[in-house]
Image (cartoon, rainbow, N blue to C red):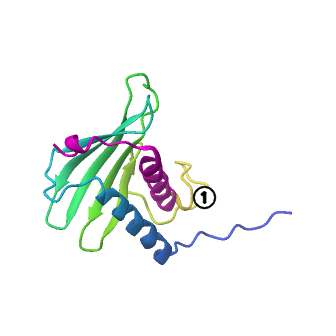
């Protein structure tokens, strides 16, 4: 039996709660005097290290680049661009894997094969990555944004 799929409707309170949690987690890796060009490395396993670097600092925002540093891995290198909004205390993924400017909702199917809730899914991926870093990651505190 064929049925018509209901359109995805973004749940703003849930999305904002997710962005608030991501903001709180990311703030653990920032110093009080964060400046453009600073970076730190998080060792997640013997083979996997991630670099968080500050690409832009403005009065109310900070933009971070998060990427896998792996000399062995040439094809798949996870990469996020995340903006922290300090006045609202939320973090939002601006780009992931060279896809940017996410809409709140996509019709499905679409030419890019993005999920109806792609923006939410990308921010959930950031949440999962932050959980991994919190659970297994090691940071040399002497090198944090040094």
Q: Residue furthest top?
A: 72
Residue at point 59%, 69% (across, down):
8
Given the current orientation, which residue lies at the most extreme bottom position? 13
Q: How many marks?
A: 1
- 100 or 129, which lies in front? 129
**Which secondary structure is most common in the magenta stretch?**
helix
Quarter of the image with the C terminus is top left
Label 1 residue SS? loop
Residue 43 in percent (x, y) is at: 37, 37
Q: Residue furthest right?
A: 1
Q: Position of residue 48 (x, y in %)?
A: 42, 33
- Closest to the observer: 69 or 105? 69
- Residue at 47%, 53% (x, y): give it: 131
Q: Which residues are drawn in magenta?
A: 119-146
Of residues 140 and 1, which is closer to you in this image? 140
Q: Which residue is mark 1?
A: 108
Q: Position of residue 57 (x, y in %)?
A: 16, 56
Who's the residue at 52% across and 75% down the image? 11
Q: Is residue 142 magenta?
A: yes
Using the image, determine if residue 116 lies above or below residue 140: below
Q: Residues within 10 Å of mark 1 (few under 14, many from 20)?
A: some
Question: Which x, y percent locates residue 132?
Answer: 47, 48
């Amino acid at each position: 039996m064929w049925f018509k799929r209901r359109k995805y409707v973004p749940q703003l309170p849930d999305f904002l709660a997710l962005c608030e949690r991501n903001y709180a987690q990311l703030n653990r890796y920032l110093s009080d005097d964060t400046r453009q060009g600073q970076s730190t490395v998080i060792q997640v396993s013997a083979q996997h290290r991630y670099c968080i670097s500050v690409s832009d600092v403005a009065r109310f925002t900070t933009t971070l680049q998060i990427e896998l540093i792996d000399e062995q891995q040439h094809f798949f290198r996870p990469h996020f661009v995340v903006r922290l909004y300090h006045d609202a205390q939320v973090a939002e993924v601006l780009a992931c894997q060279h896809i940017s400017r996410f809409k709140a909702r996509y019709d499905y199917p679409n030419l890019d094969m993005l999920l109806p809730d792609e923006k939410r899914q990308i921010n959930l991926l950031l949440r999962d990555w932050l959980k991994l870093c919190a659970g297994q990651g090691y940071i040399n505190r002497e090198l944090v944004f040094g």
